[in-house]
Amino acid sequence: MSNDRLAALAAAGISIWLDDLSRERLRTGNLQELITEKHVVGVTTNPTIFAGALSHGEAYDQQVRELASRGASVEDAIREITVADVQEACDVFSGTWETTGAVDGRVSLEVDPNLARDTDRTVAQASDLWKAVDRPNLLVKIPATEQGLPAITRAIAEGISVNVTLIFSVERYRLVMGAYLDGLEQAAANGQQLAGIASVASFFVSRVDTEIDKRLEKIGTDEALALRGKAGIANSRLAYAAFQEVFTGPRWEALAKQGARKQRPLWASTGVKNPDYPDTMYVTELVVADVVNTMPEKTLDAVADHAEIDGDRVTGRAAEAQHVFDELERVGIDLTDVFLVLEDEGVDKFEKSWAELTESVRQQLDGAR
């Protein structure tokens, strides 16, 4: 039976995506159940998710044995394993992709995070993954580093649909939207059908609070402590205002007439990390039309159980959100440094997860040989 709270969230314009994928979910029918019962219309993955999936259960054993028997390298094994899962998930979501007019039913697969500072190799791998998965509802994840920005443009220009990940600041988000529009204009010049190109921009929420709260507690004044837990939501509301601004006006309208799709904001990192905060706050406080919220299953279950969905909580609140940031600066928060630290940490975490994934696959291949 469909969940009423999640139905209300979907009705408010939020596309509910699951921030998790495993072969076990696919083989047991769990993913299909989430589509049917919990309004899930897409999936995001990252190296951490695949490392976790491979370290639990036996769902990958047969494929690992086959890879070992033909002497596959660790890198080739990772690619074949992750591509197989994403292909199957894309097929599970094919009905959603069709019924939503290719808006949802999307599955994301990330380029190797070790390439985050290398434009050319990022583009090459994005192209390889796009061809390997060979599903129109794939999104290739490219990080929004300085070197990632031109990679986004070049991938879009080639007709590759992209999930831009690791966006923390509105300033960087504006550059991401610019990179997308540049890519669409180049794609049109190259004769690409713009209607076939999709993109989301993954704007991270809870990690902003984690980093800023730590700094506020170090400052320790009443004014500083009163700002805890406010930055992530305010940042996202400012991002949505920027989205509304960029996807209006002559430049966008010229592309829209050629079939282009808006690059929707995606609220990422929406699991609450501070137990003192409501466990659904990064969902209920960011309800607004035309966005994706990708949730870990724990957050999805919390929303289904007790979230209060109270309509649009974002539109028209940019001035209020800016006031939060003005106050953060006034009490001594260096926001430029915050966002730099978050980006570096984000890349570093995914690189470490990739190393864990590599080691896990190496051990499994060795054990199967």
Image (tube, helix red, strand yellow):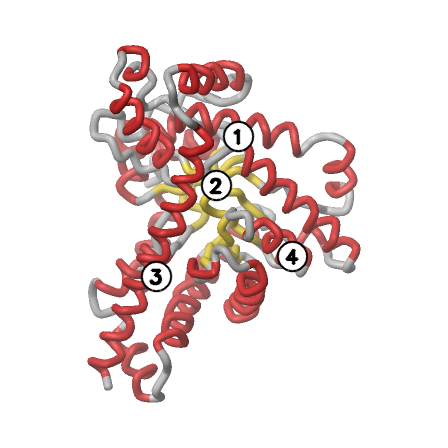
Amino acid identity at mark 1 = Ala
Amino acid identity at mark 4 = Arg
Identify the element where label 2 is drawn. strand
Whichever of labels 2 and 3 marks the residue nearer the N terminus, that label is 2
Whichever of labels 2 and 1 marks the residue nearer the N terminus, that label is 2
On the image, the x and y values in percent for residue 172 come to 54, 38
Q: CA distance from mark 2 to mark 1?
A: 10 Å
158, 194: nearer the viewer: 158
On the image, the x and y values in percent for residue 181 come to 68, 44
Q: CA distance from mark 1 to mark 4?
A: 24 Å
Mark 2–mark 1 CB contact (< 8 Å): yes
Identify the element where label 1 is drawn. helix
Q: Which mark is residue 154?
A: 4
Q: Is residue 251 above or below residue 312?
A: below
Q: Which mark is residue 354?
A: 3
Q: Which residue is mark 1?
A: 239
Quadrant containing the C terminus in the rendered view: bottom left
- Residue placed at 39% from the left, 74% from the top? 75
Residue 3 is at least partly visible in this image: yes
Q: Which mark is residue 167?
A: 2
Identify the element where label 4 is drawn. helix
On the image, the x and y values in percent for residue 350 come to 36, 54
